[in-house]
Amino acid sequence: MACVLDPGIDQPTFDLIVQLQLQETDLYFEYSKGKSRDPTDEELAFHLQNEEWGNLSQYLQDRRMAMSFATAVHADGHVLAETQVEQENALKDRLIARQLMKGGCNALPIELESESATLDDETLAKLQILYVNDMEDCGFTGDLDTRESENECAESSARAIRRAGHSLPRARHCVACRELTDFVNV
């Protein structure tokens, strides 16, 4: 089963391997039907194998969905971010207009003066760091001190120490749901 999770194999090949293994275990159970008796060790092993292949199949489906979502956010992220900024500006304008109509000053409430949460290259690079993108693509498109080795998957200790000095903020606003979440969950 470890060979199935080899990073050198593409998604359709993964799916085919899992499908063939599930069909093989189904054939075993189809031909081994008989009297109601205690299952043999062989049958128990096939049940466990079938369960593991089913779990792996579900994992691959979930991964495919996550990759699809990441691709959509990556492709449309800048549009989503621009739309969000426009909506935030419209909200601020309405609040200022409402305050001026009431005779107040045009200062914004403190909670609206915070920075706008936009989907930048840093967030997109985090998605790639988490391997949500294509498995064979180990390079990053973001600006996280990865320019000198875009095609490498491994990282030297010295480079990791340098990168550690540029710590990223832990909480970020998610572009899709607009909630404040941990940066690896964005």
Image: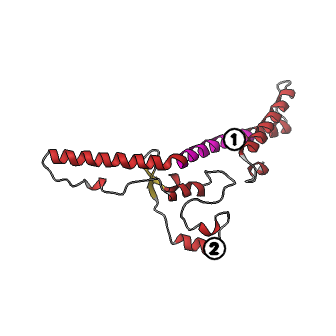
Residue shown at 47%/53% (left/top)? 119
The answer to whether residue 76 is seen in the rendering is yes
Answer whether labels 1 and 2 touch (C-beta < 8 Å).
Answer: no
Residue depth check, mark 1 versus mark 2: number of the one nearer the observer: 2
Q: Which residues are magenta?
A: 52-74
Depicted 125 relative to depicted 50: above or below: below
- Residue nearest the observer in this picture, 75 or 43: 75
Residue shown at 33%/57% (left/top)? 114
Depicted 68 relative to depicted 180: above or below: above
Residue shown at 85%/24% (left/top)? 35
Name the image quarter holding residue 146.
bottom right
Instruction: Identify the colour scheme used.
Output: secondary structure
Q: Which mark is residue 115?
A: none
Image side of residue 36 versus residue 138, left or right: right
Magenta stretch prevailing secondary structure: helix
Q: Is residue 70 magenta?
A: yes
- Residue nearest the observer in this picture, 10 or 186: 10
Q: Which residue is mark 1?
A: 55
| Neighbourhood count class around disc 1 (C-alpha, 10 Å): few under 14, some 14–19, many 20 upward | few
| Neighbourhood count class around disc 2 (C-alpha, 10 Å): few under 14, some 14–19, many 20 upward | few
- Mark positioned earlier in the residue sequence (1 or 2): 1
Q: Which residue is mark 2?
A: 157
The residue tagged with tag 1: helix, strand or loop?
helix
Q: Is residue 172 magenta?
A: no
> Amino acid under label 2?
Ser
- Residue nearest the observer in this picture, 47 or 150: 150
